Image (cartoon, helix red, strand yellow):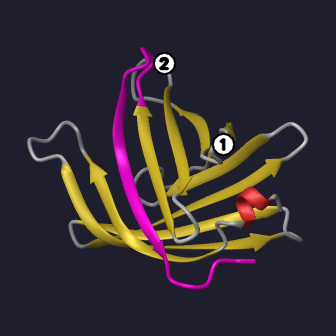
Amino acid sequence: MSDLLGRLVGTWTGTNRLYLSWLPNPEFHSPSRLTATRLMQDRYLQMKYEWSHESERHEGLLLLGHDTEANVITAAWTDSWHQRNQLMFCRGSPDSDDVIKVVGEYEAPQGPPWKWRITIEPLGARELRMTMHNITPEGKEDLAVLAEFRREDAAPS
């Protein structure tokens, strides 16, 4: 596993903010927990997270791989509220500050597909921010999720 993904291994707790832009009061807060573990001989990072909306518990799963030679991040993502019974396959790369950005596509009820961007931003060794944006076919971006975490365990060495 690349050092970039390896630094995320651990248990994290924080707050999830769900944004439903079409509502008059669009922001919903809930406690959140994220566990990042190594998989398949350290080739992949599995990020499982929990959050809630209107007292209903939800789970998400993000599987990340990093091709260090091509500097490409690939991901498979699902969430019990956003995706339900589908996996979204995403692709992207880390930037110079080790911020991971991957983008996937999903079918809209009518019209062309929309995009979904997941950004994972390590904020030092003890803090982590994960944001998700919904992107229209015209390129308009709406913040959908902002989750901020603090590491519970010791940072991996």
Residue 140, by quadrant, is top left
Q: Which residue is mark 2?
A: 112
Residue under the point 50% across and 24% down: 113
- The residue tagged 1 is 89
Q: Residue 50, image x and y in percent?
A: 44, 71
Q: Residues within 10 Å of mark 2 (few under 14, many from 20)?
A: few
The residue drawn where x is 79% and y is 70% is: 39
- Per the image, is 8 magenta? no
Instruction: Pick whichever of labels 2 and 1 is earlier in the sequence.
Output: 1
Q: Is residue 103 left or right of residue 79?
A: right
- Residue reaching furthest to the bottom: 153
Is 102 positioned to the left or the right of 85 in the image?
right
Q: Determine whether 151 is above or below 91 in the image.
A: below
Q: Relative to residue 62, is residue 33 drawn left or right?
A: left
In the image, residue 133 above or below residue 76: above
Instruction: Report the residue at 58% width, 68% height from top.
Output: 125
Q: Is residue 152 magenta?
A: yes
Residue in the picture at 59% in, 36% down? 104
Mark 1 Cα shell of 10 Å, populated few (<14), some (14-19), many (≥20) = some
Give the magenta part as a residue range: 135-157
User: What SS does tag 1 mark?
Assistant: strand
